[in-house]
Amino acid sequence: MKKPFPDARTARTGNLRRLFLLTCIAASTAICTLTVQAAEKPAQPKLVVVLVVDGLPQEQVVRYRDQFGQGGLRRLLDQGAWFSDAHQAHGVTVTAVGHTAVLTGAYPYQHGIIGNNWIDPVTLASVYCTEDTAHTYIGEETKASDGTSPANLRVSTLGDELRYANGERSKVITVSGKDRGAILLAGKTGTAYMYMGKSGNFASSTYYMKNHPEWVQKYLAGKPQDRFYGKEWKPLLADSAYAMDANDELVIDQKEKDKRFPFIYNSKSGKPDAEYYGKLYTGPYLDEMTLDFARAAIEGEKLGQNPAGVTDVLGVSLSSHDYVNHSFGPESRMSHDHLQRLDRLLANFFSYLDKRVGLDNTVVILTADHGFPNVPEFSQSIKRDAQRLDGKKMLESLNQYLSEKFGQAALATKWSNPNVLLDYKLIEQKGLKREEVETASARYLLGLPGIANAFTRTQFENGNLPNNRIGTLMQRAWNRQRSGDITVVTRPYWYFGTEAHGTSHGSPYIYDTNVPLIFMGKPWFKPGAYGQYAEVMDIAPTLAHLLRVRPPSGSEGRVLTETLR
């Protein structure tokens, strides 16, 4: 006879059976879910393309966005993860330091590249960031101070770590209009190619190889640099498109009549020569050649089609925007037009990448090594306090003051922006106290026009800089072995330079630090405008996470997890 109600044991047994069944179903569902997720997880990219636009401030990307075409910068902004509050987060915002940050994720106090040039505190010799007398350019004239290797770089790059992880099967190729732009992206184990201003060729150095590979020789044999001879650079858009730009009279030296639209690329000899090849730096044609060489590298090295099935890296540093901004400022028609032309060049390059490798197989990153201030004449026209400073005269004035105060001449030996070097041996010989001379120097410099801060070696060594943004950025930029003894920070919109016109960067202020930072790659990155604070130093750890390799040795950036799928 069937019982109307089960007893307690039977009830418990039934409940346990039901619980076990539900648990099994839940576990199976979870396993299935995990299996599906694993199956759907995108493969690693076949190619990572890192684009660095030399001297591109974020504000120009925002200001001219509506005029970009569909396939270049607009494509990156629409299809990529774009950070509006992204920065080169160190205090000496120059080309070498900014390029080093991109794939090391490190600050100068670790990576050792404190500027484009610096003074060796021991020998007092001038040092160029990528000089190495042990190596020469291949087939090109080489001077002792020319950039030929990453010998001065003290940390690894993302490319170095990628090649370490897979037995050097990944290819890492970089190209730039400047040697430092290519070499500091390539790291220790990549291969760098750079533009030669005297011949118009792209060349590597004996640090990387004895002879160029066949594809490079074939490219150079075609003399592609000569096709621009006699061409003009004139505005791409209608005159109305430039209505908001600065008046040419404010940004152009009136004594130089050839520095205005249309620019003509020729030479006195009537044929391509060093004069003509040098002119190509300022304008759209060097960038066009750089991207053409990048295409040749993709095909010659079969980048993105690695037979080992590993990811390759292509670094492209586009140098000309820096030259244009130095000459005319980011507020000029020339800079405006150059960025529009670069936008169209990038559109063509992305179309090529899509056909050759597939953009769904490629991660594209675009950033800049630094921003730019306006030219002082323009700043003055809108009531800003802006001037140029002469560093040589400043050093002479400082020495005169120190001589009067301590009774000893030439206690300050060298000036290398933004560093003053003191003669510590002489200070010790004369029985002076190092800290007193440092402090007196800093206080004197602070009293000069245009100087906002002057920090001493003792302050840096003890970590006693102000607890603010400027203090943080300057501390990161100071290297114990290579930096000077007094580091100077100008007031906003002031800069060191003796040219009659133009402008320059290098400060810890927003106009120099705020740069574009965009990641594009649909399988890996979520498109959108991101307002979170980010740094260029975040590129390397983010890529290391994506590629599942060890972060570079000096990396201090964060993984931008908010962008990852």
Image (cartoon, rainbow, N blue to C red):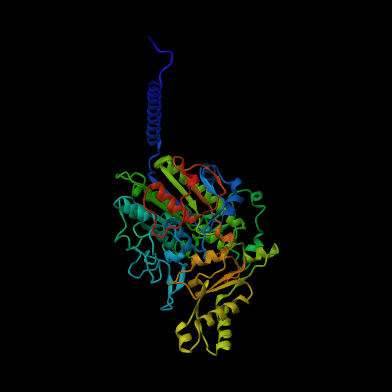
Give left or right: position of 266 versus 25: right
Residue appearing at x 42%, y 77% in the figure: 125
Percent from the top left, x then y, of residue 542?
Answer: 44, 50
Number of marks in picture: 0
Give left or right: position of 148 versus 466: left
331 or 506, nearer to the observer: 506
Percent from the top left, x then y, of residue 213?
Answer: 31, 55
Q: Quadrant of residue 149?
A: bottom left
When the figure is inspected, residue 109 is found, relative to residue 76, above or below; the finding is below
When the figure is inspected, residue 169 is found, relative to residue 437, above or below; the finding is above
Q: Is residue 219 visible?
A: no
Q: Is residue 114 visible?
A: yes
Residue appearing at x 47%, y 67% in the figure: 116
95 or 214, nearer to the observer: 95
Q: Quadrant of residue 176?
A: bottom left
Percent from the top left, x then y, of residue 323?
Answer: 53, 61
Give left or right: position of 431 versus 137: right
Q: Quadrant of residue 86?
A: bottom right
Percent from the top left, x then y, of residue 522?
Answer: 46, 40
Quadrant where the N terminus sits is top left
